[in-house]
Image (tube, helix red, strand yellow):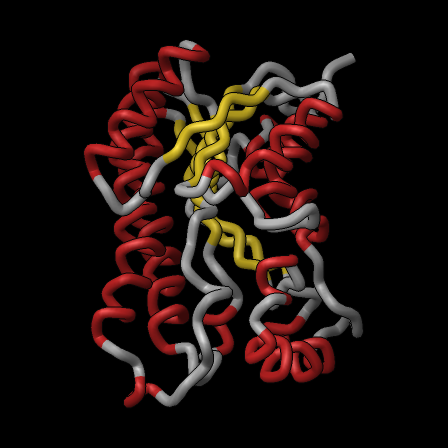
Amino acid sequence: MGGRLQDRIAIVTGAGCIGPGWGNGRAIAVRFAEEGAKIFAVDRDLDSVKETVERVKAAGGEIVTHQCDVTGAASVEVMVKTCVECFGRIDVLVNNAALYSALKPRPFTEWDTDLWDRVMAINVRGTYLMVRHVAPHMMARRSGKIINIASGAPYKGVPRMLPYVTSKGAILAFTRSLSRELGEYGIAVNSLSPGYTLSDTGLENTAHVEDERVPVRNSRAFKRDAYPEDLLGALVFLASSDSDFVTGQSIVVDGGSVNN
């Protein structure tokens, strides 16, 4: 008996992670493979995807990797074309690539405008370009699942991370609007909003850990840290037929933090 994503073709951006641990993209790729999906793993650094490949294959899954800068229209166009040539179609798109962990919290007056533009380019433009080139393939088949990784930060108005919070607020609005345009084609467009999650990449930035770990944990109904695996159940739901009548929504997975 297959899993909930049996034989679905899933593109996961930001699928790499430096080192042997868990980044969100790696965790998504492996879990989707465990559920039967075939993975097209995208990252700008293919070295970071090597461990993802090994874990997907260890789970019995099929995976193809592709190097791509999601901010470049030509790069994204070639990547999507390659995925269709490899697998024949695209069933699921997870827009996970984002700039976050490398950012150091600071007052809003101290953000360099070039860095602001870089955050917007990866987090917003990159998401748009992926949808711009993937959605037509889904539209032709009148089915598909688009999952945009947003954040719980816009709900709470997290301070000292203004460009990131702004970019993820844009993803929430982007998801709502896009769902209206693609609904007539049977394509579900939703977002997942994680709370502060202790991925291996995130743990490397001690400024985030010092600023956020304890206050966020204390704000939750579930008084514990969040890890990439905590996001996976909701993601499988959004990628599977279980959510076929769900669109334009954001599922917040943060242990109850935004309720406070």
Classify residue 230 as left or right of residue 103: right
Residue lying at 37% horizontally and 49% vertically, measured from the top left:
175
Q: Quadrant of the C terminus?
A: bottom right
Q: What x and y, as percent, mark residue 248?
A: 42, 46
Q: Residue at x 39, y 57 (%)?
A: 172
Name the quadrant containing residue 109: bottom left
199 versus 114 height, above or below = above
x and y, in percent, of residue 50 in the image = 58, 34
Q: Please say whether residue 190 is visible from this viewpoint.
A: no
- Residue 80, compared with residue 25, is above or below; it is above
Q: Quadrant of residue 25?
A: top right
Q: Position of residue 121 (x, y in %)?
A: 27, 56
Q: Nearer the viewer, residue 16 or 153?
A: 16
User: What residue is rendered at 72% in x and 21% in y?
Assistant: 3
x 31%, y 87%: residue:
110
Front-most of 166 and 26? Answer: 26
